[in-house]
Image: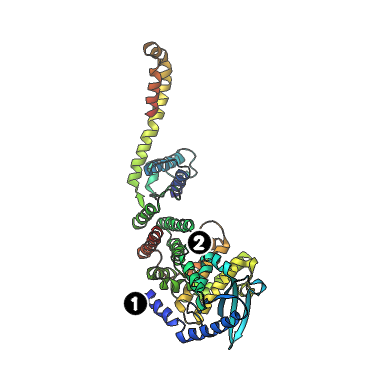
Amino acid sequence: MPTPAATLAAAVAAAETPGNVVDTRLGVAASVAAELAGAEPVVTALVVGSTALRRCSPSADLDLVVVTDRPPGRQRFCTRWVDGMRVEIERLSRRRSLAATRGDGWVWQLREAARLGTGLPVLDPTGFGARLGTRAAAMAPSPDRYEATLRAVYLALMDLAGQPDGSLRADRLRGCLDNLALLALLERPRRYQKPKWVLADLLHAGEDGLAEALLAAYGTGDALDAARSLVDAVYAAAGVPPHDEVLAMGYAPRWAEASYVSRTLDDAEDLLHSGRVVEAAYVARFAARLAGGLLGGPGGLVEAFAARELDGGYLALFEGTEGAGGDLLAAALAAADGRRHTMAA
Amino acid sequence: MGEIFNALEVLNRTMKLGLSGLDLMRAEAGFKSALVTHGNPDPNLPRDPVALAEGYELKATFRPRADGAIPLAKLATLARKEVSRPQVRVDAKAFREIDRAIAATAKAPAKAAAKKAPAARAAAPKAAAKAPAKKAPAKAKKAQKG
């Protein structure tokens, strides 16, 4: 019988955008790039985002990054419609693109670099686009932060081993696995994109064991409605507008953290509508955990939820999961050791 | 009572006192005995440390003294041991032994001091007359050690 991770891997592979759809979109991007190159000094044009990673639907936006020899000025972002397809164009100067793919970094910097690095060149007369890919892949997570995160994981694993409360232990383990997933993905060219793609990217990176552990720790049953109720309850407790309002605000600096939670929850809904049920279940629960961070207070998430009498709803999300049994702990330790060996190498 | 040990363990780590696990257990048991002897808030609790220990077990965990103080590989080994091994548990029998040891070491100097104080005062002129002055501190040190 295939493992949940193997089943998910097959589902993820089946959900990849068909080659002909990708080719059509690349063709559209190439024509737009060629048109732009006739009017400005285009160095390279890259298709980025969901099309480049073969995760788009035929109607999704097409993201095109155009690297030019001069600063883009006010024309940095623009939109075009081609054959009913919305093409989002971002202009970057050569200098800025080089700066974005240099040195060490953490989540944000690596993600930005990976966006260029995993891009598909549709116009690249000098090989500059390919060079950006090489540079982005050579970037590394900040060693200090990487080690600090890994140390925190080991210490947390030691702590949870002494935790008599099974619910708390299981929740601490989820935190460890989240951090290990972050570290594992930061090492890879795609880096850590967002919770929506964590499971798929772990499988893409060959981290099946870690994906398996996450599935066991989070559970695979539908949790979207329960997670949404909990998120709204957290928002009410924290003085944040309801989820729908936060989502409708789009970019909302005042509610930056809540905005991220809501977008994650929205991603879960999107995954569910796309038939990616298992990933949706993980992302919905992850959004609930993110929301718990808004409550603040000392201690872990369970304590934070408990302080607002929301722990019942939170823990119910994980009913039926494996808890922090020996196999899961062993998987977490193995994943941590994997990160340690990578770091040493 | 586990909280007492945890507090001592944190104190040991943060203040770098260098107490061994056994030291911590002794201190915890000593604290517990002291709690009974001096102002125990619950009069129904047994006053005898051995009897008191009957209802408790001590769960001890070992932690690196400070983040970054040990190499990552050692931390990984320690984590693996902690995760795979059940907690160190001290049962009532071990508690009794610890409490007896504490009682023996805590009462002996107190009794000795109580008995020796007047005797020492009385013997002081004789000792001063018979022995060289430098030997007196040596005797005092021995008495302190018990």
Secondary structure of the residue carrying tag 2 is loop
Q: Position of residue A318 (x, y in %)?
A: 46, 69
Q: Is residue A22 left or right of residue A209?
A: right
Vertical position of residue B27 compared to residue A157: above or below: above
Q: Is residue A308 visible?
A: no
Vertical position of residue B111 compared to residue A106: above or below: above
Q: Is residue A81 visible?
A: yes
Q: Which amino acid type is shown beneath numbered disc 2? A: Gly
Using the rendered view, name the quadrant where residue A166 is placed.
Answer: bottom left
The chain holding disc 1 is A
Circle 2 residue: A103
Secondary structure of the residue carrying tag 1 is loop
Give the foreground label among 2 and 1: 2
Task: Choose between A177 and A105: the one closer to the eye.
Answer: A105
Dot label at residue A125: none
Give the spatial CA distance, label 2 vs label 1.
41 Å
